Image (cartoon, coloured by chain):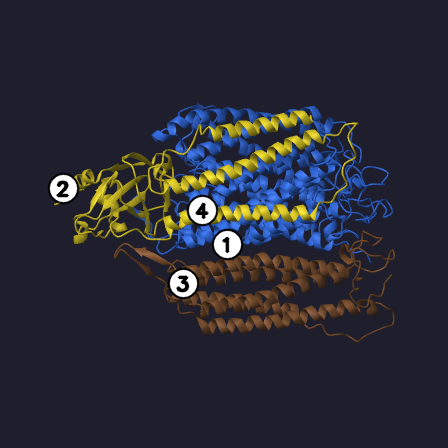
Amino acid sequence: MASFTPTIPAPHPTTSRGKRGDLPPGAGGGDGGRPDPGSPDYGARLRRARLGLAVALTPIMMLFVAFTSAYIVRQGLPTFDPNTNTVVHDWIPVRLPTLLFLVNTCVLLLSSVTIERARRQLRRQVALEPVQSIPGVSLGTERKFPWLALTIVLGLCFLAGQWLAWSDLAARGFYVATGPSSSFVYLLTGAHAVHLLGGILALLAAGVSVVLNRPLASRRIVVDITAWYWHFMALLWIYILALLEFAR
Amino acid sequence: MGLVLLCVIWLITFASTYFFIAKTWWFPHGASASTAALDHQFAVTFILMGVIFVAAQLALGYFVWKYRDQPSAARADYSHGHLGLEIVWTTLTAILFIGLNLMGSPIWAAERFRPAVDDATRVEVTAMQFAWYFRYPGPDGKFGIAKPELEDPSAGGEAALGLDPADPASKDDVVTGIMEVPVGREVEVILRAHDVIHSFFIPAMRFKQDAVPGLAIHMHFTPTETGDFEIACAELCGLGHYKMHGMLKVVSQDEFDKWLAAREAEKQ
Amino acid sequence: MVAQESHQHSAPQGFIRKYVFSLDHKVIGLQYYFLALTAVFVGMFLSLLMRIHLIWPTAILPLVGEIKPETYLALVTMHGTIMVFFVLTTAPQGGFGNYFLPIQIGAPDMAFPVLNMLSFWTTFVAYVVMLSAFFVVGGAPLHGWTGYAPLSALQSAGPGQGLGADLWITSIALFCIASLMGALNFITTTLDMRARGMSMMRMPLTCWSWFITAILGLLAFGVLLSAGILLLMDRNIGTSFFLPLGTINGQLTGHKGGSPLLWQHLFWFFGHPEVYIAILPGMGVASQVLSTFSRKPIFGYKAMVYAMLAIGLLGFMVWGHHMFMSGMSPYTAFAFSIMTMAIGVPSAIKTFNWLGTLHKARIRFQSPMLFAIGFVSLFVSGGLSGPFLAQPALDIPLHDTAFVPGHFHLIMGVAAIFGIFAATYYWFPKMFGRMMNEKLARIHFFLTLIGTYSVFMPMHYLGLAGQPRRYSQLTELAYLHPLIGLNTFMTYAAIITVAAQLIFLCNLVWSMFKGPKASDNPWEATTLEWTTATPPPHDNFGGRTPVVNHGPYEYSVPGAPRDYVMQSDPATVAAAH
């Protein structure tokens, strides 16, 4: 039996998440305190998943904070040169494949747009699902533009573009171990690429769940979380690019 | 059980404290200029922490005995705490701990914030797996170039340090396996390491400093008594860490001059 | 309408889903606990070999044979690593935290049960990888649990520094990922799944300790992972993050420009919060048990919470106190030392509050309480050697001497372990439905308390006398010879203490199957786990959701019918807090 849930239930302000206060038994759709503990509703699950994502992004940030501090420290590090008995600085900035990186940035930003489209598309679908199951009601055939698939393609294009950028560096003689500056270029871009690949795998899983006819609500949550993760990856990429280009 | 706990806790406390107060195992005799201040700061910290240690453990033992559950005991006190007490003991602890630290900071400053004096005896101390080498600059007062690619540890002495024979300044450098310095004068050590981190530790001088590859670290200390003092490596450096020891010989200025002159003569 | 989704699941069927790849936080908690139990016996065995070798360096031991200097250092490295990661970061948080956090806050499970299951199995794989280092060519690494570069970064720096070191780093990297997954679950669960009426300030202090520990882990393990990645790169693909220009065995290493101190900064940025991760849950358990068995509310609940928060926050600002002798700027050292003294203040507050809880109490001496009292004593002893090391001037003679392991063993190696013991004896009835044997528990307690003090208090004396750390023999330096007698005493004490742990093991295993049946609330405690069946049903509360009306430690409330008011008792029972 379908039940009409027009929006994500707003948590009752004085009672959600365990705060004290009077709550009529059975009211509200939030978590905890409900008389039916076995079925947290979709709104609470989405909120919980988003909280989980926010928490999960913290150690990813810390990883890149650690890499950044190593980068800054290494740039300024004086090292003892036994040939002259003096202290020297040996940082030589790498000439970056800036054009390639800018093209990749555009691809990534575009993919952010497409995944946001996918996220909103699914949100609409979930909201309209109960309406569409009322016999006789039709909203017309909503054409389902494959935003998700497009994002995956763009994501893979970004990774391919990064590969091209690394090839460009290698062709000019800058490998991982060539010098400290090249080490960091590969390290930062590589670590980002690994995390982005994780996001692509999540999107593929979301795509597979369409084929397997998983419940719409769970698919929406997966895409929603991955979309926010994806936007974070885009921002992270811009940060890394800015760091490499300007903090030389 | 309360009484047993009290006895055990109090006994452990008294036994531990006894050996601290009796100084059964204690710092070796200090023979450097920093010894007095450092040992004094240690003593102050030691007495304060000791008093707190004894008081806290005695209180713990006493409370678990006094407030044991027994038929005649009063109902436990339904108290959630006492804000005034919290403020008092927090403030006192903060003042004590931070005050103690500030009290000791001039010693750290004297040891580390200033460079060595101009007429210090300069010795370059080089650490490698698993030996200490000492280099004196010789009559020209300059340390010659030492290059990693020239190092040959099996040959000992100058070759182990990788002294560059092409550099004129290195021809008169004196390399020894024992560190000899004159008493009463500041010694400047320039700490280097070839391979991994080692640490130059002379307990009698109250001196310790890590020797780090890629760095040349300048430190100083002033021996105030003559004698032979052992040097230990105090940073894990590999399988020979336990036997990487050296010797500091502190002698009179005359003896040092004679010794150094003899060594420099060998280099001619 | 009820979606069978990942964090609400019906009771599983089949052995594999029930006991192997379980999504139930209670099973996962027990899996973590038993992993830590095997790890602690491995770690103790390694340390016993170390202590025996120190006294009898030329002895040929059964099974193990001769212990060469590099073997000794491999024992040192693996003992430290296994104990810190697979015991102290696993049993209190992964074990008891997983089992009891959801129940104590009134939730049916953790927020993300599949992630929870993955975090345990990743920990398990990390453990297997770590142990495998013993069995590869060259053996386990010898660079200590702190893994300082260049020793850890050069494959030819010593035996075990080849594949063994790579496996060590890989294991730690896997452990980082597992811990981060776990931290994610703990934080989300605590913030999002508390029952109605369970405000943050009504949570038991155990829940606060697990929550703050998870936040520390969330912020710290990412940095350790970054250090591990850089180290693997230096070791295997020729980068020079940590490696300066230098030689090894007279050969140029081929690296240049890197900084060994960078490793230390990254490692200790993680390493210092790690030791608070190891002790905070023990503090939470100590508070819980002391209150329960004193029949008194914890003295200064709010202060306890703020103290733990302060310890967590300040814990990220003190890492440089491990590096006073490292060649770091002495001015930076001074700044770190002030912060380090500051962190002693919240620790002192907690100790005063524990004493305040015991004051005017009615103390019951069952086994959990013995270990909680022992915890306080050990925390005082271990904590008070801190202010010596925190002062850089005093650190000069004491750094890298036996004084340092004396300090951290009393806190991590004993007090935190007593926290695990207290939790075991306390929660055993709830987890297994049976009681442990009290007589054996008392023997275990007294032997362990006296034994561990006998092993670790003398380390302070040895440190004052200048005995350096990580020496495989005391035979080479003349000034160490007079210390061999005390070292011998410590070795005998260690043998007896390790043997005493077999009493605990026998008690644990026997009682699991044959112990007398336990009631739902044998300790007459107040927190939510004691309101439910023993052992708890699959969804923790048998279909009902608790509603919380009281604080966590309402003992001896005037006017109440019993000397304890449970958190979910009706609001009319005594004054609500």
Residue holding disc 2: B266
Rendered shade, chain B: yellow
Q: Amino acid at mark 2?
A: Glu
The disc placed on residue A181 is 3
Residues at marks 2 and 4 on the same chain:
yes
Category of crowding for the residue at label 4, using alpha-carbon neighbours closer than 10 angstroms: few (below 14), some (14–19), many (at least 20): many
* Chain (blue): C
Q: Chain of mark 3?
A: A
Per the model, the C-alpha gap separating discs 2 and 1 is 52 Å
Is residue C565 rendered to the left or right of residue A170?
right
Q: What's the distance in space between the residues labelled 3 and 1, CA to CA?
A: 17 Å
Q: Quadrant of residue B59?
A: top right
Viewport quadrant of the N terminus of chain B: top right
Q: What is chain A's hue in the picture? A: brown
Q: Position of residue B155 (x, y in %)?
A: 22, 40
Query: Is there any visible trace of residue C219 in the rendered image?
Result: yes
Question: How many other residues sit within 10 Å of disc 3, few (<14), some (14-19) or many (≥20)?
Answer: many
The residue where tag 4 is placed is B104
Which marked residue is nearer to the observer: mark 3 or mark 2? 2
The answer to whether dots 2 and 1 both sit on one chain is no
Q: Is residue B163 above or below residue C413?
A: below
Q: Secondary structure at mark 1?
A: helix
What is the C-alpha distance between the residues marked 2 and 4? 46 Å
The amino acid beneath tag 3 is Ser
Asked which secondary structure carries label 4, the reply is helix
Q: Is residue C116 visible?
A: no
Camera-near label (1 vs 4) is 4
The answer for how far apart the CA atoms under marks 3 and 2 are is 47 Å
Q: Are marks 1 and 4 on the same chain?
A: no
Q: Are marks 2 and 1 in contact (CB under 8 Å)?
A: no
Looking at the rendered structure, the kind of residue marked 4 is Gly
